[in-house]
Image (cartoon, grey):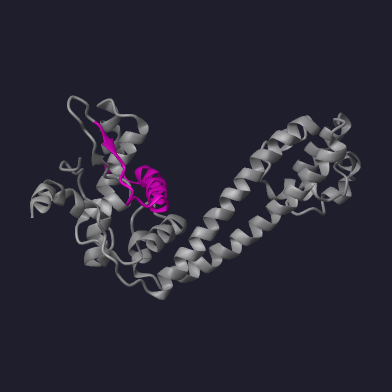
Amino acid sequence: MLQLMRMRAQLPMAQAVLQEVAPVDGVHRQLKALTRRRKQLVSERMSISQRMQAELHGVAPGLLDITGQADNLWFLGFLTCREDLRKLKTVRRSTLLRLRGVGVSYAAKIALWQKSATFADSAAWVGPMIQADARRMLELREAIAQLEQKIEQLLLHSSLAKRLLSMPGFGPTCASELAAEIGNIERFKAEASFAVYLGVAPLDHSSGKRIGAKLPRQVNPRARDALLIATVHHMGQVAQSRAFYDRKRAQGKTHMQALRALARHLARVLFSMLKLDRDYRLPNHEPTNIA
């Protein structure tokens, strides 16, 4: 009993972070598997792209300048059209024009590069690795596209996703990730626990004269990232939200602090939408009670 009495002060905090275990239907279980796999493949593609860009600068100076972006469909096709990277210098214009995505403009840029193309000695062993990465990136693009097609089909059967899509700035990718990670809104009895789960309601971590906050372990990082990305797009489409963000910046908040404050407000709106099963309705006037 004495131990329970000591824990009384912690009960409100516990109620704010705990989420109940609730059944999740098959649609949202599938969405979770597909969206998580998609995110993994996107991360792999970004990692390979960064590695390729660094290696291309060292092996074939000026080659990447043709496009500036290694993760480009036509550029990946060009890198893999010959077995030896060094032979790209002699690819004919007629062959270039047959490559997917290469038109007259890009063919001219490639021809200009070919006139002064040079390769480092390391091209003999680094070149095959670059081309292997390029082929892997092409595979990843195809796999991601297939996943996105399946996700869009599942979105039609997700009531959560349909409500999220009604919010300006919430596209299929962010809506599907949020719907998948939420699973069942009945898990959350209070808006506070919902906000904690989305990572936009840090818990108080003050001690003595020190004032601070920390993110609880109950935060879902995938849902948090999807919400923040959607918030950026939402802010660009809704003037009231942009004005709220600008006020926070004027108060001295950093970009991320102002963005999280806006995401915190959107979490309240989303919770109400999902609980009441209603679409988002754009306010007719600028809200004055959001914080």
Res 164 quadrant in image: bottom left
Residue 115 visible from this viewpoint? yes
Q: Quadrant of the C terminus?
A: top left
Residue 230 point in image, percent of width and height:
39, 49
**Residue closest to the far front:** 2
Q: Is residue 12 left or right of residue 128?
A: left
Q: Main secondary structure of the magenta part?
A: helix
Residue 237 point in image, percent of width and height:
36, 46
Q: How many marks?
A: 0
Q: Quadrant of the N terminus?
A: bottom left
Residue 35 point in image, percent of width and height:
49, 60
Q: Is residue 276 magenta?
A: no
Residue at image position (36%, 32%) is: 255
Residue at image position (21%, 55%) is: 191
Residue at image position (59%, 54%) is: 41
Please name whichever residue, 287 or 248, is drawn nearer the observer in this view of the structure.
248
Please name whichever residue, 98 or 244, is drawn nearer the observer in this view of the structure.
244
Q: Is residue 231 magenta?
A: yes
Magenta segment boundaries in residue numbering: 212-240
Is 228 drawn above or below residue 163 in the view shown? above
Q: Is residue 78 left or right of residue 244?
A: right
Residue 257 point in image, percent of width and height:
32, 34
Is 19 drawn above or below residue 199 in the view shown? below
Q: Is residue 22 left or right of residue 150?
A: left
Res 67 quadrant in image: top right
Residue 282 visible from this viewpoint? no
